[in-house]
Image: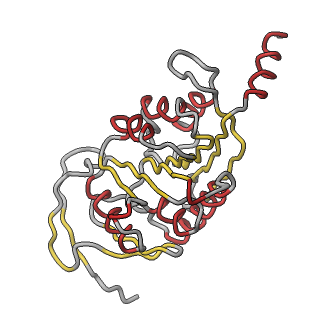
Amino acid sequence: MNMKVTSIFFQSYAGLSNPSPDHPVQHVFGKTSMDEKLGKCIFQISPGAFFQVTTEGAEVLYDVVVKNVKEVTENPKDTVLFDVCCGTGTIGLTCMKEGAVGKVVGIDISEPAIKDAKINAEKNGYSGSDDVARFVASRAELVMAEETRKVDCAMVAVVDPARDGLHSDVLRALRNKRKIQRIVYVSCNPTGSLIKDAAAFCAPPTKKYREAPFKITSAQPVDMFPYTPHCEMVLVFDRMTEEELAIENATESVK
């Protein structure tokens, strides 16, 4: 097999796990980034930026996400997608390109990934000047509440966190924003952190979670790594209506 090496990077790390996204990387040879076509979009990827390792599998995964976003966007042009843990902007920009939403706000802790996301918005026809695709480099729990307050139209959220799941402040911001009627949760840890986060989304209202809970309406595993025990899970949470809450409360009171 002939393999062409386009880039070489070197990273020294003495830890036992993955280094942080801003850990220094030395460029040794070739291009400083690479472009990858995923669906209808072209994405630039730099060292330190997360990107799905199997492009064909990612296309299947994103098709599931787009389908679930489209189901609740009656007027896509007036709908904002919050892409939490957005990486290089792949999910949000794919949803835009597929006409599922009219605007994306992406949030990710990795500055290299956010830099790529801004470039990817330009590459795919979304100029930074028109503010339809905005990306923020920050821990999601520090900015999520403020970012949702800036939006006064229909919203849908897609979250694609690392194995530890969502920070409690992000869970609270999503739960307490009434206009978010659907959350599409992409999990790489469906038997661990997804269970914890699902419990927070679906628990009865409390002082911490003031707004109506969500209910699980769809679960779709996607086998990104064949012949391994691992899979991605796309779980859909829809906000419960007042009628559904009344029925549930009545049922609980009878018990």
In this rendering, would 189 be left or right of 215? left
Q: Position of residue 216 (x, y in %)?
A: 69, 38
User: Residue at (52%, 69%) from the top-left corner?
Assistant: 97
Q: Which colour scheme is used?
A: secondary structure
Q: In the rendered image, which quarter is residue 127 located in?
A: bottom left
Specify the quadrant that holds the C terminus.
Answer: top right
The residue most toward the right is 254
User: Residue 23 at what x, y percent from top left?
Assistant: 19, 52
Kindly identify the residue that appears in the image at 37 percent across and 56 percent down.
134
Residue 20, given in percent of the width and then of the height, sits at: 26, 47
- Screen quadrant of the N terminus: bottom left
In the rendered image, the vertical position of residue 138 relative to residue 116, given as above or below: above
Would you place residue 195 above or below residue 208 in this image?
Answer: below
> Quick one: 236 or 11, which is closer to the camera?
236
Q: Quadrant of residue 166?
A: top left
Q: Which residue is drawn at 49% across and 32% down?
A: 171
* Residue 176 place in picture, x, y as percent: 53, 29
In the image, 124 versus 50, the foreground residue is 124
In the picture, measured across the screen, residue 222 lies left or right of residue 113, that is right
Total of numbered circles in the picture? Answer: 0
In this view of the protein, which residue sits in the foreground, 225 or 87? 87
